[in-house]
């Protein structure tokens, strides 16, 4: 079994900051890529930021404002969000590609989602 637990969402004023965390636990042999997605009701889930090794990529809408990072020793991925805008309001999901112990395949796992609301 593998579990992903997200934390750090909440209500913040425009221009404010939040840091999301996602911890993976369980029978993990290796983690390949880690990423954050977000979804607004009625719209498709979109990639916000991803990191594989030391290489990171970002959606154009968050470049320069969001920073993704990972702590391999803690199996944790972070999303530091700054200069938040109302249009950043969404449910944020972490996505991790994991190879479990005694398995040769990488499988995608999703967190439960955490609400981020940017409003005055």
Image: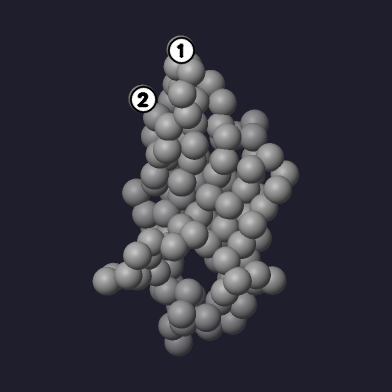
Q: Is residue 73 left or right of residue 111?
A: right
Give SS at disc 2: loop
Q: Badge 1 local density, few (<14 within 10 Å), some, or many (20+)?
A: few
Say whether marks 1 and 2 touch (CB < 8 Å).
Answer: no
Label count reads 2
Identified at 57% across, 66% down, the residue is 59
The reply to whether residue 91 is visible in this rendering is no
Quadrant location of residue 30? top right
Q: Is 91 rendered above or below residue 51?
A: below
Task: Tell me the CA gap for discs 1 and 2.
Answer: 12 Å
Residue 119's quadrant in the figure? bottom left
Left or right of 120 in this view: 69: right
Q: Which residue is most to the top?
A: 102
Q: Secondary structure at mark 1?
A: loop
Instruction: Give the residue pinned by disc 1.
Output: 102
Q: Quadrant of the C terminus?
A: bottom left
Q: Is residue 107 left or right of residue 33?
A: left
Q: Which residue appears at 40% of the width and 29% of the height? A: 2
Q: Quadrant of the N terminus?
A: top left
Q: Residue furthest front?
A: 105
Q: Residues within 10 Å of mark 2 (few under 14, many from 20)?
A: few
Mark 1 or mark 2, earlier in chain: 2
Residue at 48% from the left image edge and 18% from the top image edge: 104
Residue 113: percent from left, percent from top = 37, 54
Residue indicated by mark 2? 1
Q: What percent of the width, then of the height, locates residue 67?
A: 65, 60
Q: Residue furthest bottom?
A: 120
């Amino acid at each position: 079994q593998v579990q992903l637990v997200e934390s750090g969402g909440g209500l913040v004023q425009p221009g404010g900051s939040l840091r999301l965390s996602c911890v993976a636990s369980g029978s993990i042999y290796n983690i390949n890529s880690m990423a954050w997605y977000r979804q607004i009701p009625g719209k498709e889930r979109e990639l916000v930021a991803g990191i594989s090794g030391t290489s990171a990529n970002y959606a154009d809408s968050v470049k320069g404002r969001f920073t993704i990072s990972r702590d391999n020793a803690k199996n944790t991925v972070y999303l530091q969000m700054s200069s938040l805008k109302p249009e950043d309001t969404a449910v944020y999901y972490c996505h991790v590609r994991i190879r479990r112990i005694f398995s040769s395949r990488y499988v995608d796992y999703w967190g439960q989602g955490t609400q981020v609301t940017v409003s005055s």
